[in-house]
Image (tube, rainbow, N blue to C red):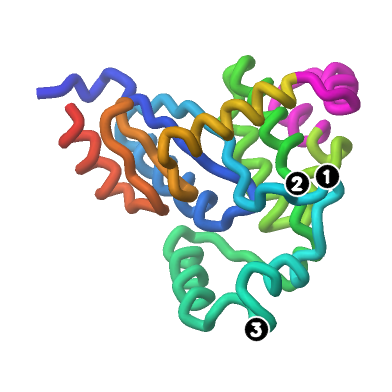
Amino acid sequence: MPDVAAPVRIDVVSDFVCPWCWIGKRSVDALAARRPVRRVWHPYFLHPGLPKEGMNRRALMRMKFGADGPSPAMQNALTGALEEAGLSVDFTAIERVPNTLNAHRLMLWAEGQAVADIVAESLFQAYFADALDIGDPHVLTRIGAAAGLDPEILADLLAGDRDQEVVEARAADMLDRGIPGVPAQMIGRRSLLVGAQSPAALEDAIVAAS
């Protein structure tokens, strides 16, 4: 029988402009409230090739889904899943979809200081709840500082290209491993779950992988 006191490693592949990734995070949060979990975050670009300055959200949705945008069925499924997770998003308030390279750079540095889980939640909150541009270095500096990172160091790092290639290489590695989309969760490096999972499904995967 596995030792429930030993933290279970869950590798989380995510992007911070993906609402399903926020839902998936909340499921892992619920699991972590019941048993020790160690999350390792991996970058993914939901919209690869997005300009550095991001893009108008309505224009991007038309490009991806056509003139009418996502289908009613897709929108209803997302709305229901958000409500079930206790989340609420006013998508009409979100004007732009940012390039998330800088957000993933911030996550890399946050992980080095053991505050990645805090920063991840703050990034989702900033984008989906507050409609902030999480590609903006000033916004990211505030998020990092609130988690305990040095704001002056962050501002200097974000002004340059430090660790950009590291993040891009890690995102490419996820594609090379066959990750088809996000969110994705790797349980104990043995079991891959794609899509937002319920806490019960995550628990079942942990048992199966042990």
In 3D space, how far apart are the residues under numbered discs 1 and 3 (Cα atoms)?
26 Å
Q: Earlier in the sequence, mark 1 or mark 2?
A: 1
Quarter of the image holding residue 148?
top right
Q: Nearer the viewer, residue 132 or 14?
A: 14
In 3D space, how far apart are the residues under numbered discs 3 and 2 (Cα atoms)?
23 Å
Q: For the residue carrying disc 3, how many other residues have a C-alpha within 10 Å: few (<14), some (14-19), or many (20+)?
A: few
Q: For the residue carrying disc 2, how many other residues have a C-alpha within 10 Å: few (<14), some (14-19), or many (20+)?
A: many
The reply to whether callout 1 and callout 3 are in contact (CB within 8 Å) is: no
Residue 74 percent location from the top left of the image: 49, 74
Q: Earlier in the sequence, mark 1 or mark 3?
A: 1
Residue 55 percent location from the top left of the image: 81, 58
Task: Using the image, tell me which numbered label, if any, was put on residue 99.
Answer: 2
For the magenta stretch, what is the residue range?
141-162
Q: Quadrant of the N terminus?
A: top left
User: Mark 3 highlights which residue?
Assistant: 68
Q: Amino acid at mark 1?
A: Lys
Left or right: 110, with 154 as reference point:
left
Secondary element type, mark 2: loop
Above/below status of 189 relative to 92: above
Q: Amino acid at mark 2?
A: Asn
Which residue appears at 45% of the width and 28% of the height?
39
Residue 9 percent location from the top left of the image: 36, 25
Task: Using the image, tell me which numbered label, if any, was put on residue 132.
Answer: none
Give the tally of numbered discs.
3
Secondary element type, mark 1: loop
User: Mark 1 highlights which residue?
Assistant: 52
Secondary element type, mark 3: loop
Q: Nearer the viewer, residue 157 or 152?
A: 157
Q: Nearer the viewer, residue 175 or 127?
A: 175
